[in-house]
Image: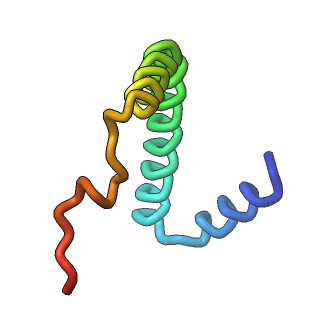
């Protein structure tokens, strides 16, 4: 375990029991979310590559516009 993680847990251990539970749930939720994103990105590599190639081809063919031209933004 890293020193920073040890410090975080040491500080969390000083919290009231209810807050420790919230902290633990938050950390577990973040770890679960990170694992899901890692899995999704690993599975979608080929799709992301194809989408990137399509976007570049559209740009080279002159089929795209700069983002600021596509937004309906009014000055305040």
Number of marks present in the image shown = 0
Q: Is residue 5 above or below residue 37?
A: below
Q: Please tell me in which quadrant of the rendered image residue 74 appears.
A: bottom left
What residue sits 51% from the left and 37% below the top?
Answer: 34
What residue sits 47% from the left and 31% below the top?
Answer: 37
Q: Position of residue 62 (x, y in %)?
A: 37, 34
Q: Position of residue 39 (x, y in %)?
A: 50, 21
* Left or right of residue 21, residue 12 in this image: right
Q: Is residue 37 above or below residue 30?
A: above
Q: Residue furthest bottom?
A: 76
What residue sits 48% from the left and 21% below the top?
Answer: 53
Which image quarter holds the N terminus?
Answer: top right
Q: Is residue 27 above or below residue 9?
A: above
Q: Position of residue 46 (x, y in %)?
A: 50, 13
Which image quarter holds the C terminus?
Answer: bottom left
What residue sits 60% from the left and 71% below the top?
Answer: 14
Report the colour scheme. rainbow
Q: Position of residue 72 (x, y in %)?
A: 17, 63
Camera-side residue of 23 and 16: 23
Camera-side residue of 18 and 42: 42
* Left or right of residue 65, residue 37 in this image: right
């Amino acid at each position: 375990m890293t020193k920073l993680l040890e410090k975080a847990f040491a500080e969390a251990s000083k919290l009231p029991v209810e807050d420790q539970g919230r902290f633990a749930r938050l950390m577990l939720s973040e770890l679960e979310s990170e694992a899901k994103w890692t899995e999704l990105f690993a599975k979608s590599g080929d799709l992301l590559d194809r989408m990137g190639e399509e976007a570049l081809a559209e740009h080279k063919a002159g089929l795209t516009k700069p983002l600021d031209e596509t937004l309906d933004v009014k000055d305040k």
